[in-house]
Amino acid sequence: MDEKGFMLPETAHKKDVVVATYYIELPVEVDIIKKAESLAVGQTIGTWVPIPGITEEIREKYMGKVVNIFEVPPTELSVYEGEKMAYLIQIAYPTANFGSDFPLMITSLLGNDASTSAQVKLMDIEFSDAFLARFKGPRYGVEGVQKLFGVKERPLLLNMVKPCTGISPEAGANIFYEAALGGVDIIKDDELFGNPVYSKPEDRVKAYKAAARKAAEKTGKETKYFVNITGGVSELKKNIRKVEEAGADGLMVNFAVLGYSTLKYIAENTRLPILGHSAGAGMVTEGPLNGMATPLAVGKLARIAGADIVMMNTPYGGYPLRKQKYLQIIQQLTLPLGKIKATMPSIGGGVHPGIVKRYINEAGKNIVLAAGGSIQGHPLGTTAGAKAMQQAIDLALQDVDFCEAAKAYPELSASLDKWGYVK
């Protein structure tokens, strides 16, 4: 064992490093100390064979150091008879290796498996204050978004234009108008709808904002439109300017496919609030022995990159996300993180009026409730579906018997008849 390849947590916390926590499974006969050390070296200064040119200064300043190794479950004695062992490994990486952006950092923490020969899942990254100070994070954050909408004591209500694809700006504007009449706070594009030839983002902004103003003449409230600009890098800068000039209220960006660095670039090049969407994150989160944990991929990294709102899954829709992970995503988005502002969680997937109270009880009031099918698919129509969601939010915040009080509202009652009530 090379003592220079190891570091105690107390020492790591005083240095400008990030500490990565990995999960790994190995045959019981494999020496985990050597495996962890090879991972730390391989991800920083090493390769699969010794090479000349590595000085003591390089090893001290730029080599990864093993901080901790934990057996899962804890096994102190050499009496284990299974074929495999599971471990959590913590490694400190000098930030001098990758600067203040995401591509090289993620490559350094997770991208050299050919040399390290280690199948690991990245569970979390602990950032130093010095490293976090290099990032601006969300421009608005939770408080800024609430100020923008003039709302603080209730969740925001979001709807998305459906059908997902195949509709013109004019057809989408009609759908937008019906939802806006019901009092929706935000309407966004579906994540599948970006920049098709038959509906350019700037054309949608013009058509949808006209629909928003038309609805506001009747409701007194103008619904805001977050336009999806997800697309190729060559299009992004141009599309940001076009939709800003057309009057967009916010941008939607699928960071799961564009990457955190692209999200950071967008956040630094617009004054508009950003809704970060996580569609496709399962590609890097669902494997038990590779990729990243969902709270890190959808929560902490998206927040640091600059998303003001993050669209996330829940355990109550069609996606089998563990409840623990869902709550940890919310924590990663909202708990104190240096000087980085809190990001507002946007909860989607199976959101209907009968489950609103559960979401508020579990996630609090500082959230966005993203309801799609329960608005467009309401038995009394889209406007009634939006009203039902607003009625459910209002009642969920009061100390009343929800189901009994709902009887006074035809729209909400129809929703509960169709989708039920979830305690």
Image (spheres, helix red, strand yellow):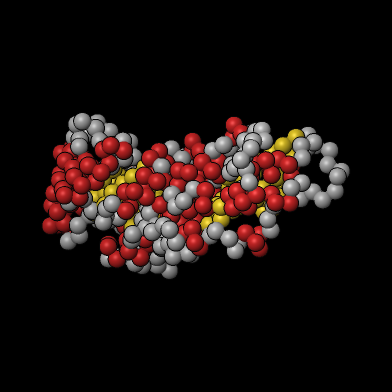
Q: Residue drawn 27% across and 53% down?
A: 270
Q: Is residue 176 left or right of residue 73?
A: left
Residue situated furthest right in the rendering: 79
> Residue 370: x percent and y percent?
36, 49
User: Is residue 315 in sight in this rendering?
Assistant: no
Q: Is residue 186 left or right of residue 28?
A: left
Q: Is residue 170 left or right of residue 298?
A: left
Numbered marks: total: 0
Q: Nearer the viewer, residue 139 or 93?
A: 93
Q: Residue drawn 50% across and 44% down?
A: 106
Q: Nearer the viewer, residue 78 or 213?
A: 78
> Splitting the image into 4 quarters, where does residue 86 fall?
top right
> Residue 56: x percent and y percent?
65, 49
> Residue 326: x percent and y percent?
51, 50
Q: Nearer the viewer, residue 357 or 49?
A: 49
Q: Residue drawn 32% across and 64% down?
A: 144
Q: Is residue 270 left or right of residue 313?
A: left
332 vs 1: above or below: below
Q: Nearer the viewer, residue 134 or 156?
A: 134
Q: Residue drawn 32% across and 53% down?
A: 268
User: Is residue 9 in sight in this rendering?
Assistant: yes
> Splitting the image into 4 quarters, where does residue 41 fall?
top right
> Residue 418: x percent and y percent?
38, 44
24 vs 399: above or below: above
